[in-house]
Amino acid sequence: MRHAQEAVLESGLAHPRQKSTVLHEQRKGGVPTIVMGGFVPDATEQVYLLRGRLLKFGSLYYFNYSRHGFSVDLFCAQLDDLVEELRVLHGQQPVLFTVSFGCGLLLEWLRRRRRAGRPDGLGGMILVSPVACAEDLLEPGTHKPTTLVGRALKPYFEGTVTDAGIEKSRAVFRKMFEAGAQNKESLHTLMTRGELERLRHGVLDAIQSIDAAGACERVQALKGMPSPADYFSPENLPLSDAPALILYAEKEASALAENSPTRFALERAPRAYFSNGTVRVVTNPRGTPVQHASLIFHVFNFLPPIRAFYRGLKKGKLGARA
């Protein structure tokens, strides 16, 4: 089904270069998962070590954002089409597995569906290290951002990014990945040398090949999203009554601003936004602290709450949907 995305393209609100690539792995099981990653890497690499676990519950769909542009309108339309296809053709309600920037896209999509009076059609949601507005990365009124990601992306938010600035942001994301990859002892328990090389190639290729338009439009999409505090009212909430699991890392400081409004809202009032929502902080008591969205290098720490969430869905223990 492509009705919604075709309508957006025909209206001129978006361009074909901004269209995400949706990849699909078919499996038996009644709980399909749609993965929406952060700025980088692609969704396929984001859940590289979780893939086998997720496929036990049903098919996997990966939203890999275009490397040559981005449109929130077109993304939401593509997600509309996919969720509708699963509902109509397969009678399924998918889980949306979202990471960092992908969590912001989820919140925006839910806001639009609610505003239009359309049910979300979801079986559940997982939000890992949510980033949903510019203030999550840049403290308002702060001259110099306090986080590594904030410093890399500040020129994009200000519209002053240069070729040198783009290369600097690439270097930051490469550095963040390579820092995790230095933990050799942990990596040997996670994957073989060949698997690590394939993963490294996929991640670094995505970072390097996102062009100026792709990078700028992704960041501008985040800039255009409101803070969750801006729509904190009974008229706008809850966004969904589907089961929702919100996971923060114990050490979010490399990415999230200290006064992240999204974190404040979701930790203080999760059930206002998701009537069947819970929040957990993922820790690693026996090794390096869990970092922002570190689903690769701290997969064993994220796995227990994620596995429990899916098992609860399968057994119908996480709340009934109307």
Image (cartoon, rainbow, N blue to C red):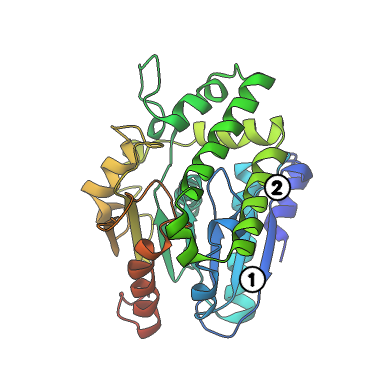
Identify the residue at image location x=54%, y=33%: 172
Residue nearest the observer in this picture, 34 or 206:
206
Q: Where in the figure is residue 120, as x and y percent of width and height?
A: 48, 63
Q: Is residue 106 above or below residue 193?
A: above
> What's the CA distance linking mark 1 and mark 2?
17 Å
Q: Residue furthest front?
A: 185
For residue 208, side relative to residue 232 (left or right): right
Say whether residue 161 is visible: yes
Q: Quadrant of residue 78?
A: bottom right
What is the crowding at mark 2: few (fewer than 14 residues within 10 Å), some, or many (at least 20)? some
User: Residue flagged by tag 2: what amino acid is it?
Assistant: Val
Residue at position x 73%, y 39% in the image: 68
Q: Position of residue 178 (x, y in %)?
A: 53, 43
**Could you say which is closer to the camera, residue 44 or residue 8?**
44
Q: Please determine whether, in this image, residue 78 is positioned above or below residue 8.
A: below
The type of residue carrying mark 1 is Glu
1 or 2: tag closer to the N-terminus: 2
Number of the label disc, if any, that sits on residue 85: 1
The image quadrant where one finds the C terminus is bottom left
Q: Quadrant of residue 314?
A: bottom left
Residue 136 position, x and y percent, is: 38, 35
Give the left or right position of residue 191, taking residue 298 as reference: right
Would residue 80 be seen by someone viewing this image from the given angle? no
Residue sitting nearer the eye, 198 or 208? 198
For the point 69% across and 38% down, the residue is 208
- What element does badge 1 sit on? helix
Q: Give the residue pinned by disc 2.
A: 8
> Is residue 11 depicted above or below 63 in this figure?
above
Residue at point 62%, 51% (across, down): 200
